[in-house]
Amino acid sequence: MIKIVIFLLSFSFLLGQSDEMTVQDIIKAMDNNLNAKSRVITSKMVVHGRRSSRTIESRNWVVGINQAFTEYLSPPREAGTKMLKLDDKLWTYSPQTDRVIQISGHMLRQSVMGSDMSYNDMMEDRPLVELYEATLEGSIEIDGRDHWIMLLEAKVKGLSYPKRRAWIDKEYLLPMKEELYAKSGKLLKTSTMDGIKKVQGRWFPSRFIFKDALKRNSKGTEWVIEDIQFDVEIPEHIFLKAALRK
Amino acid sequence: MIKFLTKGILRDRSRSLFPVIVVTLTVAMIVLFQGFITGIMNSMFLDSAVVSTGHVKIMTKAYHEENQLLPNDLALLDAEKLVRELNQEHPDYFWTPRITFGGLLDVPDENGETQAQGPVYALGIDFLSPDSRQIEIWKLERRLVTGRLPENANEVLLGTKLAGRLGLSSGETVTLIGSTMYNAFTTYNFTVVGTFKLNLGPVDRHMMLVDISGARQALDMENAASEILGYTNSLYYEDQAAVALRTEYNINHNDSTDIFSPIMMALRDANQMGTMVDFSNAAMAIILVIFLVIVMIVLWNMGLMNGLRRYGEIGMRLAIGESKGQVYRSMIVESVIIGFIGTVIGTAMGLGITYYMQEVGLDYSAAMESLSSTDIIMSNVFYAQVTPDLYFIGFIPGVLATVLGTMMAGRAIYKREMAQLFKELET
């Protein structure tokens, strides 16, 4: 009996969501799930190259959308490499050269550690609601779960992906699949997520898969979240340029 | 008979001087043209082979398909073993691994912050192996403008223009910003030990040369190579042999299922070099035919004029019993002698000028600098080349044109009426 009540309640909740939530509400909910005041992530990136796969482990400290610090932990060649993002600037430090180098201009389009993600992808952390105008295109059932299909079109200039289409899970309120397009309509990248877990009261994926559509025969990059903590206190000194050399 | 005719030619200068001058000048021009075209083409083939194509080169099929992007993630693996096998299987060639890569060169200031930055096109070349001929074929000792040659893996030479643009001189450190073989971002410090100038147009505008071991460290390409280049031991490009080797190699290593299987390309397969190879062969044949026809027409005309001048002499010879055939043949022998003398003098003259152009060359720096394309690598200074064929190539048009010209003009002999001869002689 209790099970039936729970099922009916869940069902009515889902139906209620689709009816009551506006497009703006959905995007805000997505932003709330994916962004936080601060977060500390330990993750590994599995880059599936055309010949072999490489696993790169890193730890990230992120505050809001303007401050991010990443330290690579392995493999040995990458260990000790650090990246600092402050507003729209990105620096990288490599222990082999003992140089802090600002990544700017066309270098931002380069791949991060050989993955299917670019530095630009890392830089665009702003909430979707600030960047895109959304249109609901319809609903679809994927793997037995209801999704909205939403078209997002840039309302600010200079974005890497002026157009994107997202398949948003109606329960998790996460873009389970996204197609990222150039202004011309050319598909540039796809991303999917899975392993959704409830972390500190929000749904969050434990694995993202990015695929660069421009790379021929790309097998994609997995970004596996091993540990994530939201809204933790992060000392300010982590986001100083001097921290790169420490 | 020949002695008699030779004496006649030498004593009657009006009979020999003009034809000899025409043949001499023509042959000299042919020899010079041939020497010049051979020189330009050979130098272009060798420069192209040294900088990018080799006489033949091997890469993976996947690399070949995307080679404009310098996709080092598709490079050849276990390159040293491949080089050893190639050296054993094809001893007429010497084989050398090469890594070609691009990136940014970042010059630090005293605080390690970026002072200057610029794009770089870099070549990782096997300079440091004991039996390497790369310093020799790159003519680096001659092309070095400042500093010295690299002695360690992390030492680099920069093109003078690149060094000038970044304000770099010997002894300074630069950081390469690029991508590893796994497409990961990488930075690597190199020490500049010298600057060079290739004098090959715009090709060295952004160029950096580093030993392949340094490139491998920087790009995480242990025992890998973008390409393996093969050069004939004589450094002379033989198109047919290269094409045969390429065809045989590709048949033996054909694996349509493996995009990383090796594929060989000949020099003619790259950067429209095939067109240049064919052009050089065709150009020479066309030039020879054109000269042959022009000289033949000139000498035919000259023979006609000679026929008028020697109208009386020929008539007398026919009147005293020489047959028309004998007169005709003697004139042809005369023309052979004239052609031979003109050709010998013309060949000597042509060889002399060609040798001079081989040593001094024609400086086209200003024109070449304005080129923006780097697809075809051409020297800024065009040098002629004295080759063995120049010693005999002039004999074909020199003697043949004289004989053909005389044969055409000499037909008039057969039109003389025997009955009219004495009447003509009386007047």
Image (cartoon, helix red, strand yellow):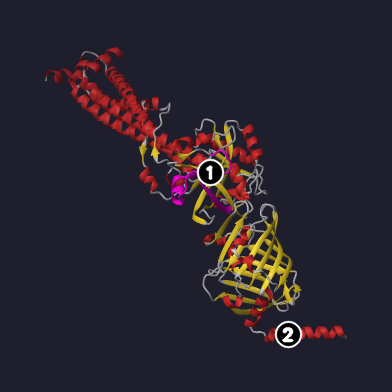
**In this rendering, does residue B238 appear at all?**
no
Q: x and y percent of residue B178 in the render? A: 57, 53
Instruction: Give above or below for B230 relative to B272.
Output: above
The answer for which chain carries disc 2 is A
Please state if B79 lies on the left or on the right of B339 as rendered: right
Q: Which residues are magenta?
A: B150-178
Residue B156 is labelled as: 1
**In this rendering, does residue B180 appear at all?**
yes
Instruction: Give above or below for B383 relative to B366.
Output: above
Disc 1 residue type? Val
The answer for which chain carries disc 1 is B
Q: Nearer the viewer, mark 2 or mark 1?
A: 1
Q: Quadrant of residue B248?
A: top right
Residue at 38%, 49% in the rendered image:
B370
Residue at 40%, 38% in the rendered image:
B283
Please state if A234 lies on the left or on the right of B99 as rendered: right
Label 1 Cα crowd, 10 Å radius (few <14 / some 14-19 / many 20+): many
Disc 2 residue type? Leu
Q: x and y percent of residue B176 in the render? A: 55, 51
Say which element carries label 2.
helix
Q: Nearer the viewer, residue B328 or A101?
A: A101
Label 2 Cα crowd, 10 Å radius (few <14 / some 14-19 / many 20+): few
Say which element carries label 1.
strand
Q: Is residue B154 magenta?
A: yes
Residue A15 is labelled as: 2
Q: Nearer the viewer, residue A175 or A42?
A: A42
Q: x and y percent of residue A136 in the render? A: 62, 80
Instruction: Give above or below for B61 relative to B84.
Output: below
Which image quadrant: the C terminus of chain B?
Answer: top left
